[in-house]
Image (cartoon, rainbow, N blue to C red):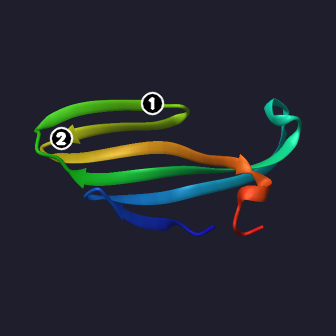
Amino acid sequence: MSPQFLIHRGGLFWNYHRSTSVYDNQYFDGEEWRCDEDWFLSIRLEPKWFGYDDFYYDGHTVKSITFLGITLGKGYSYDARPLTKWDDK
């Protein structure tokens, strides 16, 4: 996958790495699931001088630092669903 750029909520995101895996989900009777994992960098303007944020929710993470109103961040996200629920199958 080539790097992708996205503008979201006033920030510029660069998706620099993606991996895809298919596995048997033991929690759902061995049904095949697909998981796309994304690693990204972000930059945006914030109305504050300094700051540090460490966000975590259900495996999704973003760590960012703000200096003189410019926020730089690094994050990880994923999308996991049954293989039959993907449109590109």
Label 1 sits on residue:
56
Residue placed under numbered mark 2 in the picture: 67
Viewer-proximal residue, 17 or 79? 79
The quadrant of the picture occupied by the N terminus is bottom right
Front residue of 9 and 73: 9
58 is higher (above) or lower (below) than 43: above
Residue placed at 49% from the left, 58% from the top?
15
Quick one: 69 or 33, which is closer to the camera?
33
Quadrant of the image for the C terminus? bottom right
Q: Secondary structure at mark 1?
A: strand
Q: Are marks 2 and 1 in contact (CB under 8 Å)?
A: no
- Residue type (three-letter) at the residue carrying disc 1: Tyr
Q: Looking at the picture, how far across and down is residue 21, in whole percent? A: 76, 50
- For marks 2 and 1 on the same chain, the one whose residue lies earlier in the sequence: 1
Total residue callouts? 2
In the image, is residue 23 above or below residue 54? below
